[in-house]
Image: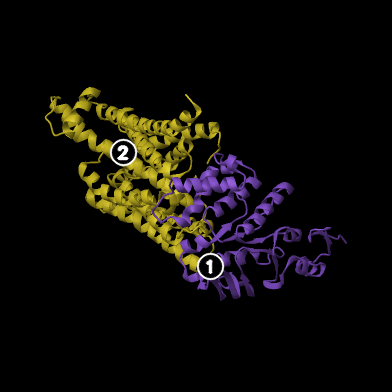
Chain colours: A yellow, B purple
Amino acid sequence: MSEAASVAAAPARRRLASFSLAALPVLALLLLVLVSLGTGRYPVPLGDVFSLLLAKAFGLASSVDPTAQTVVLQVRLPRVLGALLVGAGLAAAGATYQGLFRNPLVSPDILGVSAGSSLGAVLGIVLTLPAAAIQGLAFAGGLGAVSIVYGVGIAVRRRGASDPVLTLVLAGVAVGALLGAGIALLKVLADPYNQLPAITFWLLGSLASVNRGDLGAILPAMLIGLIPLVLLRWRVNLMSLGDEEARALGVETRVIRPVLVAAATLVTAAAVSVTGVIGWVGLIVPHVARLLVGPDFRRLLPASLLLGAGYLTAVDLLARTVATIEVPLGILTALVGAPFSLWLLATAKRGWA
Amino acid sequence: MLELQDLAFGYGARTVGSGVSLTLPPGETLCLLGPNGGGKTTLFKTMLGLLPPLHGRILLDGTDLSALPRREVAQHIAYVPQAHAAFFPFRVREVVLMGRASRLSAFASPGPADQAAAERALATLGIGHLSDRIYTEISGGERQLALIARALVGEPRLLVMDEPTASLDFGNQARVLGQVRRLSGRGIAVVLSTHDPGHAFLCADRVALLHAGRLAGLGPPGETVTPETLRLLYGVEVAVVPLPGEGRAVCAPVLP
């Protein structure tokens, strides 16, 4: 091939390479979903799962055994979709917060969204409210906590504090401690035989009770939250330079920061409201994504979404198969995530960023 | 182009400096000299519109700076901070690309034309070969040049550079000052601060002396940078030794 021709062919080859780079993780995730739908106490062969999903997608009748159909479509599908949605959401929110707060050790909990959601859910459990009301309280609690933190941050800044990001983080720590005290108080007051176990399980997170109604309830909030993240994906890079430099480069940080915080909070609160607190996903997945595709948020966001969805689906698969009882997700995400992050810490050549 | 009228600047209730008036024509290089804590950085932040003036006003082509949206200010005035370590390992190309933010609408991402502009800016500064390197892994001098490229890629008319030669070695200082000289040749005005009064002779059309928050002098380097003014500014004896031929001088402290 002549030199000119090989130069002309280079962009096409690069496009092909980047396409296959993007296609592989998507295919891997689809395979994981199929395995996840087929695995459990009532195993369904992969081929059956696949033909069943295809038939359903095109509105055709399926020849697969009706029991298997019920298990896959009614029992496992909502749960797997929940894992995909919640994992993707938590990871995207984590990546956003890490960019905004210029710190790779920040998780979506930094502004108190988990603590607020927990207080709302625990209150709902103590008051023996129905499940939907508990979810609503958790959602409202998460949003409320972050609103308070943001309000405190703005009030403090008016009085002369210069670094808006540091002010927010400190306000988040303080409000989080207050909410933690509230949760502890409610645990002491709760009925130790029925309510306390429910509270404990909620605080460890689970996808076991996720149903279609839950998915329908959180999907709008998640999508509304993800839209600004997608639209402002390049601006997140600029926000990671810090408030002053971003403004000097022409970014209206006073508009964009609250929009991004609200979006990431909405996604997190919606996720946490149906599953309870699931730690580690929002912290560790963006990290791994950054090691794979670099810090540019235009690639980091899709990578975090895919990895988060895959990670939580895999962990949930473990949670319901590894032992005879279900293992709470919060235990497994840490049990799998912590050693993995230590391994990364020891082997990553570009350090912990 | 940029006009400071009886400007007082500072943080909230704390006034750092006041009574500063000066006009900056297009293409002029103005060197700001002053001791540590003299208010240079605060003045720069105010000139960039990042801090509101406490008194007086700043006019950009006759329009009050504080009335303009951030994006419009950034299209005209670019900021070159001191070479810093970024928090995330962006590639040099990605860092330079961020300078296009003022030319793109809020939801837009940079396209091929912006990419090309970034590569051109890197080539202009002679660091095109660094395009693919990780910003946090290149040297301080290279970072400073990359930050100048980031400022230039937004096609500004004024560059505000906060101590662009700080923490650079001798060769990199000369390289950065050489780029500053070239900018004024392209009609871009530059305001820079430095700790070496000799730099004023190397690249500046005019020198402004900032002492205790007030302008203690403003004029061409040959008239403004003298042993007397430097003693006032820094509190030490300084010898200003003219170099033969070029109308330049070196400044060296005289140790007691």
Using the numbered discs, state the Cα–Cα distance from disc 2 to disc 1 in whole angstroms: 43 Å
Residue shown at 50%/33% (left/top)?
A344
Which element type, helix, strand or loop, lies under badge 2? Answer: helix
Q: Residue furthest left?
A: A61
Q: Is residue A325 placed above or below B148 in the rendered structure?
A: above
Q: In what quadrant of the picture does the C terminus of chain B appear?
A: bottom right
Q: Nearer the viewer, residue A5 or B91?
A: A5
Q: Mark 1 lies on which chain?
A: A
Q: What residue type is labelled 1?
A: Gly
Q: Total label count?
A: 2
Q: Is residue B218 placed above or below A21 in the rendered structure?
A: below
x, y (%) of residue B31? 68, 63
Q: In what quadrant of the picture does the N terminus of chain B appear?
A: bottom right
x, y (%) of residue B80? 59, 56
Q: Can residue A186 be seen in this view?
A: no
x, y (%) of residue B222? 77, 66
x, y (%) of residue A296? 46, 44
Q: Which of B21 and B49 is in front in this view?
A: B21
Residue indicated by mark 2: A84
Q: Which of A42 and B92 is in front in this view?
A: B92
Residue indicated by mark 1: A160
Q: Which amino acid does label 2 sit on?
A: Leu
